[in-house]
Image: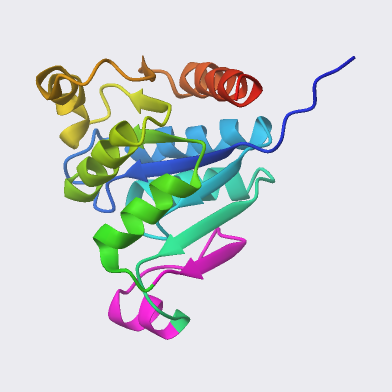
Amino acid sequence: MEIIFPQIKVVISGAAVSSPCREDIYELSYEVGKELAKKNCVVLTGATTGVPLWVAKGAFENGALVVGISPARSYREHTKLYKLPVDYHNLILYSGEGYSGRNLLLVKMGDGAIFLCGRTGTLNEFSAAFEEEKPIAVLTGSGGVEKYFSELIMVSQKGEGKIIWESDPKILVEKFVSLLREEINNA
């Protein structure tokens, strides 16, 4: 008998501004989204610019369901006050929680989270995912705060967590989806 898995919800966390990231971060981000689409995953983003938008684009253009969780209270606030895009998302939910509140909601909604490059918001989401004991995948060598994650885990003295460290987007997604399926199957 074949085991049918529910759609896996993968949170995407990464820099909204690419300046701390490696030069080809948008191509790598698109590839992550494309691979998640191939695995029939639901992609959850912070409905923002930069890395998350490029993952959303890769997922959306390859048939995945992409849901954004906005820090804003409404479409108008999302586009006018926060100046955030609505492209490449099937649905955007307006949390009204600002960035830090949105970050926690986003992490809690997913089955696990993938981290690419990043700045303060990514660090916030990483610590929330680690604290919530969510499975995590880190695209190593992507830049920004990503290079400090292993050190943060070590100094936190809370164990190693369920983390996949990988520099190749295709292998990262393959390993991560397998881990998430195992987690769901053993729940």
Q: Residue 16, can we see it?
A: yes
Quadrant housing residue 113: top left
Q: Quadrant of residue 142?
A: top left
Name the residue: 56% across, 22% down. Answer: 183
In the image, residue 64 lies at what x, y percent?
65, 45
Residue 94 magenta: yes
Residue shown at 52%/66% (left/top)? 92
| Residue under the image location 48 percent in, 39 percent down | 30
Residue 48 percent across, percent down from the top left = 37, 60
Relative vertical location of residue 80 with respect to residue 14 in this rendering, above or below: below
Q: Which percent across, then down, holds residue 172?
A: 46, 20
Q: Nearer the viewer, residue 27 or 131?
A: 131
Left or right for 6, reference 77: right
Q: Give the image location of residue 102, x and y in percent.
A: 35, 60
Front residue of 45/94: it is 94
Residue at the limit of the structure toward the right, as seen here: 1
Split into 4 quadrants, where in the image is the C terminus?
top right
Q: Would residue 124 appear left or right of 183 to someone viewing this image?
A: left
Q: What is the tally of numbered marks visible in this picture? A: 0
Q: Determine whether 86 is above or below 129 in the image.
A: below
Q: Looking at the figure, which quarter contains the N terminus? A: top right
Which contiguous range is marked in magenta?
A: 76-95
Horizontal relation, residue 89 to residue 22: left or right:
right
Extreme-front residue of the structure:
187
Q: Is residue 113 magenta?
A: no
